[in-house]
Amino acid sequence: MLDDTDRRILRQFQADPDLTTADLAARCGLTSATCWRRLEKMQATGLIQGREAVINWAALGYTVEVSLRFTLDKTVSRAFDEFLAAAREVPEVLEIQTFLGRVDVRLSVIARDLAHYQTLYRTRILTLPHIADIEALMHIARIKSDRGLPL
Amino acid sequence: MIDPVIDLDDLDRKLLRALSQDTSQSAGALGRRFNLSQPATWRRIKRLEAAGVISGRRLRLNAEALGFGVTVFLGVKLARKGQVSLGDFERAVTAIPEVQSVEHVLGLYDFRLRVVARDLGDFERVLRRRIMTLPGAGEVEANVLLSEERRPGPIG
């Protein structure tokens, strides 16, 4: 389904999502028409799901980022669903992931400063249902963040 | 408390939220949605970019359809801290193509990695040959991603 040309397009596009179709085509050594047709096809088949703007929360005053890892009380049958539904109600939660492993759920939470984080932690996080255990990893620096696929 | 570098009004927040979901919409189309002229919309987007609120764009690909069926989050603890420089570890880990993100954290682990692989066998290969052999890598904890959702965050 995916040939080398498609892969080349995705690799270049992933590295620089701001490229116009013409520039992308030039980098891949293709004509604009060919490149456009292949992009259209990959969009139609759902390989390319879209392009999104990346928000820099620090520029909006959110300087604290914490990764909270939860173990849930699995004796409660609806623990996951109820926990996830409640976590979605907290605006400062940016990401919700569920896992197979020692950790059940991870939330990525941002706050304006440590005082704000402490308030959030006490009033919105500790009050989430069915928590058996919480671990916090305080974010210091982002070393790599492109999230690109090794195509 | 650190002041944000930019104050957003309601329209900015709506635009930001829309762009964080789909940035391929034209300024004209976005403007029509929010009752704003095309030039006014364009100016607001430029202002968000200039203030660094929009730090870039990301292509959203269907990893599974592209053959990457497994995503694993790794917590990595450095062994013998001080003897191996953080810089050496960071340079080496950043160069691994399967490692999608690297965060330096404070807590139970020193680094948090997001790793993508074709399947569990492929992941094992990456773990053994590339992660465990990193300079200074000590204890590693792996959690296999089952589901993931991104939330809009505190805008609006």
Image (cartoon, rainbow, N blue to C red):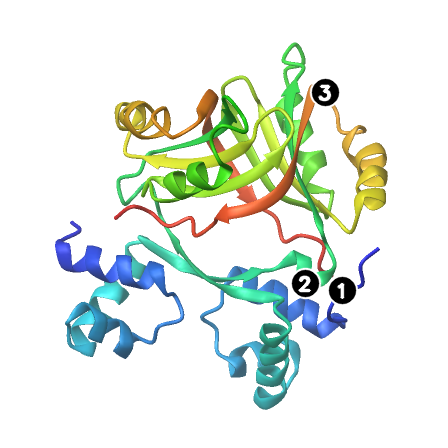
- Determine the residue positioned at 29% across, 46% down: A150
Disc assigned to residue B4: 1
* Callouts 1 and 3 on one subunit: no
Q: Measure the alpha-carbon separation of dots 3 and 2.
A: 34 Å
Q: Is residue A25 above or below residue A128?
A: below
Residue B149 position, x and y percent, is 54, 42
The circle drawn on residue A70 is none
Query: Which mark is nearer the camera, 1 or 3?
Result: 1
Q: Position of residue B77 (x, y in %)?
A: 52, 25
Q: Under tag 1, what secondary structure? A: loop
Q: Label 1 marks which chain's residue?
A: B
Q: Which residue is mark 3?
A: A130
Which residue is found at the position 61% from the left and 85% from the top? B43
Query: Mark 1 and mark 3: span between their CA atoms?
Result: 35 Å
Query: At 79% from the left edge and 41% from the top edge, which residue is drawn?
Result: A117
The subunit letter for the residue under badge 3 reads A
Closest to the observer: B83 or A72?
A: B83
Position in image of residue A95 (x %, y %): 59, 42
On the image, the x and y values in percent for residue A73 come to 67, 14
Q: Residues within 10 Å of mark 1 (few under 14, many from 20)?
A: some
Residue A33: name its quadrant: bottom left
> Looking at the picture, does residue A25 appear above or below residue A123?
below
Q: Which amino acid type corresponds to the residue marked 2 in the rendered image?
A: Ala
Q: Say which quarter of the image contains residue A17.
A: bottom left
Residue position for label 2: A59
Q: Amino acid at mark 3?
A: His
Q: Is B145 situated above or below A52?
A: above
Label 1 close to label 2 by CB (< 8 Å): yes
How many labels were placed on the picture? 3
Q: Is residue A104 left or right of residue B117?
A: right
- Left-right relation of B80 to A65: left
